[in-house]
Image (cartoon, coloured by chain):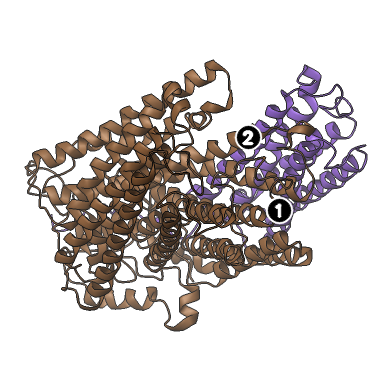
Chain colours: A purple, B brown
Amino acid sequence: MAEPTVLQNKLPVGAIDTRASGWWAMIFVIFTEASLFAYLLFSYFYLAVQPHLPGTFPEGGSPSLALALPNTFILLLSSVAVGWAQFNIERDDSRRLALGMGVGAVLGMVFLVVQYFEWSAKAFGLASSPYSSLYFTVTGFHMAHVVVGVVMLWALFAWSLMGYFNRVRYAHIHIGALYWHFVDAVWLVVFFTFYITPLLGVKS
Amino acid sequence: MTIADYERAPTVAGEGAHAALAEKLGRIWETKPGILGWLSTVDHKKIGIRYIITAFAFLIAGGVEALVFRLQLAGPNLHLLTPEQYDQLFTTHGMTMIFLYAGPVLSGFSNYLWPLLLGARDMALPRLNALSYWVYLCAGIFLYAAFAFGFGPNDGWFNYVPYAARAYNGGPNIDFYSLGMILLGISTTVGSINFVVTFLRLRAPGMSINRVPILVWGTLTASAANIFAIPAVSLAFFLLWLDRNMGTHFFDVPAGGSALLWQHLFWMFGHPWVYAIVLPAMGMVSDGLPVFCRRPLVGYTVVALATVATMVLGFGVWVHHMFATGLPDVSLAFFSAASIIIAVPSAVGVFAWIATIWTGRPVFNTPFLFFASFIILFTIGGVSGYMTGSVPVDWQLTDTYFIVAHIHYVLIGINVFPVVGAVYFWFPKFTGKMMGERLGRWNFWTMFIGFNLGFFPMHISGLLGMPRRVYTYADGMGWDWLNFITTLGSFAFAIGVLLFIVNVALSYRRGRTAGNNPWDAPTLEWATTSPPPPYNFVVIPTVASRHPLWEGRLGEPDSHEHSYVNAGLVLDQGRETVGTTPLDAQPDIILKMPKDSFAPVILAIALTAIFIGLVLHIWWLAVLGGLATGVDIIGWLWPERSLGETAEPANG
């Protein structure tokens, strides 16, 4: 045996599907980001179970679902749009890919605008109480992630229009979409924590 | 680029010297000379050496700080330092050693060694690797610039509130510490992600996970832990910065916040971090020690599993730092039990190393002495840790010099001794020169005796009740001579470190030429030249065992497969390496590796600008830094044809 016997058939070259190094990197970016939100929500529950004056945790009682619930659906829809874009590039349809990315980005922006109104309607500010500090910090962290995601979706939109991707080469789409789905999924946890758990009795 | 370039069967070269191929690869992988090449290189070996040198610079800075306050503590009622200066010095010492030396120096070794150990041409994400170094450097400069202006951290390295709250610490010291730590956290996080991805994707064909060196297991485990643990401390410091600058109430007890929230978040990170800065060093011993015992490590599988088990348990012990805070008994009992159980996987390692020496034919040279002495120091540090894992003992000993002795036995014993041993071991690979053996002996014995002389008496001063972090003490407490000996020992230890640096400098200038494999070691880094060429390996090795260079003499049957280091895949169409499957390491893609790039260094500067803006409240600078960060990242990630990220042109 003078030669190793590893080689058989052709190998793809470059970055494709789940064999791209960037895809693996994004998986672990998501692990670390998910940990960040876990620690944020740990802080919420840790402070929630400390003694408080009545009506200060959550400040002003359970937060209203009037804007937050529809906004949650908007964010979920944006994930659907991005998923639809992924579905289409696997069928070599760059135009629908771009459309899906664009719609996803617009819905992400709508989410941010609604969040702005949600924030403005609060009777308290960042420095009012531990609850208010948590509310603005945690939702602020999430909004920062949405901002990053929206910029990323627009970049993917532009690159899609420039014809960079086809049904084999779309690692960027795959990786970006992974991040966006994470940002949406983590909102569900944030939403559940801030809007639903007070209704279940986690308050003082 | 034609369609054929998107898919190909790589050629396989047979045994031979491959001179023409080596020359071609040299042209492809070489970094340009000059300052531009220096700033843009993504070569893991250059980055690794930078990490190690920078970390040693911080080790020296932290060491000098310690010597100054050891003078202050040499006798009772001394006034060399004011209490305020003492606070800054001991805190900066702790921050430096734990965050700017102990972690980064191991990242340096792993950066340098991983691709060589794994048979790859670089790390999986070379530009991210460069970013990780530049951000580390910027964070270190950020923290030390503050110290130079008298704004160093001054509430102990774990920075408890309410001491660290604005009301009790009005200067900018803690703001610099908070933001500097977040910046450093970015470096550690991206570095850790890079290690994990490299482990999963870049091992040489055939290097299934039961064939990777233990150092790789150590760094992998530490990196995986960092990915989950770093956000806790970054968040804690960010919330503290908000409390101090934006009037939030996370840690503000009178307003309904919690001081213990800080301790929880800090130690949820802090304890895993302790393991993150020792497991890779233990890995270096697990790989280095057997070479000098002339046999493979005893119990490879259990040592690898124990490494992972230590880390997993390490996430469940953080409350043992908080035994004295009045938590419920059930919590104390749980965390005490977890802290005691963690002795089991640690002991597995100890017995494996002892058995390796016992059943081997030890060669008593300098690297062996450092590696073997580590076992003794680890055992002493482990036993004192085991003692304080017990709640009643901890109540007696917490915040005394006993704990100071413990942390130094652990961090110097398990980090510094293996690291110095590792320099002796891998210096020939780094430079092509051997380190001086005679001076090495002097170096070892001075460090070993100085260390024990300096730190062992701290156990006793702690048992006699001397609290840590006092800037001076009254006479007649029974602590005087113990402290005097400690100061003497710490200076002896420092002389040992100085001898080490002298030895490195002398050996670098006129050491004996090393050759590829001066120690006759078994792993892949010794298969290439010393120092290695920019592309590491002319052909990608194929691995069939844990000891590719010792095959044929470990008594394995002839029918075994062989590893190949001079024959294998030829990847010479630009910067390329082979991607393999995560468990079995079967080739599944040819990865295109990026060229040298300025994006990492620019991104590091942009990120630093954000943090300077935040700490000095120059908001426009923070915004500008943020915009530059965004632009840099978009440019960095722009899909590149040369990396095979974009579709081939239609009908191409």
How far apart marks 1 and 2 lie (CA) works out to 20 Å
Position of B8 with respect to B609 (left or right) is left
Which class describes the residues within 10 Å of circle 1: few (<14), some (14-19), or many (20+)? Answer: some
Residue where numbered disc 2 is placed: A38
Q: Are marks 1 and 2 on the same chain?
A: yes
- Disc assigned to residue B311: none
Residue furthest toward the bottom? B34
Residue furthest toward the front? B476
Which class describes the residues within 10 Å of circle 2: few (<14), some (14-19), or many (20+)? Answer: some
Is A174 drawn above or below residue B476 in the view shown?
below
Is B371 drawn above or below residue B346 in the view shown?
below
Residue where numbered disc 1 is placed: A148
For label 1, the SS is: helix
In front of the other: B369 or B186? B369
Q: Residue at x 19, y 48 (%)?
A: B289
Q: Is residue B552 visible?
A: yes
Q: Mark 1 or 2 closer to N-term?
A: 2
Q: Chain of mark 2?
A: A
Task: Choose mark 1 or mark 2, whichever is in front.
Answer: 2
Position of B380 with respect to B192 (left or right) is left
Is B316 drawn above or below residue A126 in the view shown?
above
> Where does the C terminus of chain B fall, quadrant-wise?
bottom right
For label 2, the SS is: helix
Tell me the amino acid under the disc marked 1: Val
In front of the other: A182 or B150? B150
Position of B581 with respect to A204 (left or right) is left
Q: Residue at x 29, y 78 (%)?
A: B23
Q: Is residue B546 visible?
A: no
Quarter of the rendering containing residue B422: bottom left
Q: Chain of mark 1?
A: A
Tell me the amino acid under the disc marked 2: Ala
